[in-house]
Amino acid sequence: MRSRKLTLAGALQLRASIYALIRSFFATRNVLEVETPILSAAGNSEPNIQSFTTRFSGHVDAGEAQRWLRTSPEYPLKRLLAAGIGDCYELGRVFRNGEAGGRHNPEFTMLEWYRVGWDHRRLMEETITLVEAALAMVGRRAEVHIVSYRQLFLDELGIDPLHAPIDELRAPLAEYSIDPAGLTRDDWLDLLITHRLQPAFSRDCITVIHDYPATQCALAKIRAGDPPLAERFELYLGQHEVANGYHELNDADEQRIRFERDQTIRRERGLSESPLDHRLLATLDEMPDAAGVAMGIERLLMCLADTNAIADVLAIPFHEA
């Protein structure tokens, strides 16, 4: 096995401590821990995420034979919200095909939680509090920098991301010789974050970016304005993106349009399509106003262990499983 920055015992103890911290954190806040299916008859339509599939060999009355391993517990958790379960969270394994490397493992642990009656700004604060508690567990503290997506670009690059032409977005990336074929405006914005902004984030700083361009709404509500903005946030600890949260969309018609738009992009890229989650769509209008956030536990553990290698915080990485 490869050499580790942490000992195997140290990595396992750190993970166990984080799990205990998370469960205590939510128990004191009366947020219910739940467990939802890992296998689903529906898949994730997001064009940048690829799913694992398998087949059920039992009796046809049991349901659809083709099954997708979840890439997050988001859809079933929203069905629970629509059923009236209230504030809830799940801590469990998720699976993403093709994502393996120094910072990625095809199976990893995700924490996802939902707060009824909250918006993304209020959930940002709770997410920061949880990350601060995790840092305190290993004797560390961090400054907190909260900034809007637009202001971050203006402050650090002198670019207005909501209005600048694509040529202006491409200019700061010239040194990377990026092939522009097929890249959209949002692709260039993402590249500016990963190549120019994120590398400058301080190790001992929690950076929270909020209110994204409406074109990057994902499953978030869009707030009317000039221009309209997606009510979502991302939290970084140092240079690692740790959490991604939304003021959740609960309009089934709009969600169906977004799913179908994703499928169109997948077809254009030659990617496989998976069935849409019709059970989610059938209940989404009944989901109460809520905010939700997903946190990558390995990313958090990497920050706590001060390592850039995900294998350092896994019991057994994918290539040795």
Image (cartoon, rainbow, N blue to C red):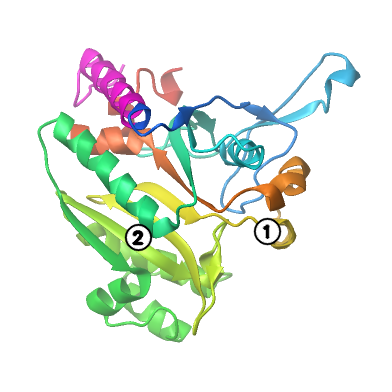
**Label 1 vs label 2: CA separation?**
31 Å
Looking at the figure, which quarter contains the N terminus? top left
* Residue holding disc 2: 194
Q: Is residue 92 visible?
A: yes
Image position of 148 (left or right of 178): left
Q: Marks 2 and 1: in contact by CB < 8 Å?
A: no
Foreground: disc 1 or disc 2 = 1
Reply above or below: 176 against 39.
below
Residue 157 at x, y percent in the picture: 27, 77
- Mark 1 crowdedness (10 Å alpha carbons): few <14, some 14-19, many ≥20: some
Quarter assignment of residue 85: top right
Residue 159 at x, y percent in the picture: 33, 82
Residue at point 89%, 20% (across, down): 60
What secondary structure is marked by label 1?
A: loop
Residue 129 at x, y percent in the picture: 26, 44
Image position of 61 (left or right of 223): right
Reply above or below: 252 against 154.
above
- Mark 2 crowdedness (10 Å alpha carbons): few <14, some 14-19, many ≥20: some
Residue 219 falls within the magenta-colored stretch = no
Residue 198 at x, y percent in the picture: 28, 59
* Residue holding disc 1: 251
Q: Magenta-highlighted stretch: main secondary structure?
A: helix
Q: Which residues are magenta?
A: 1-25
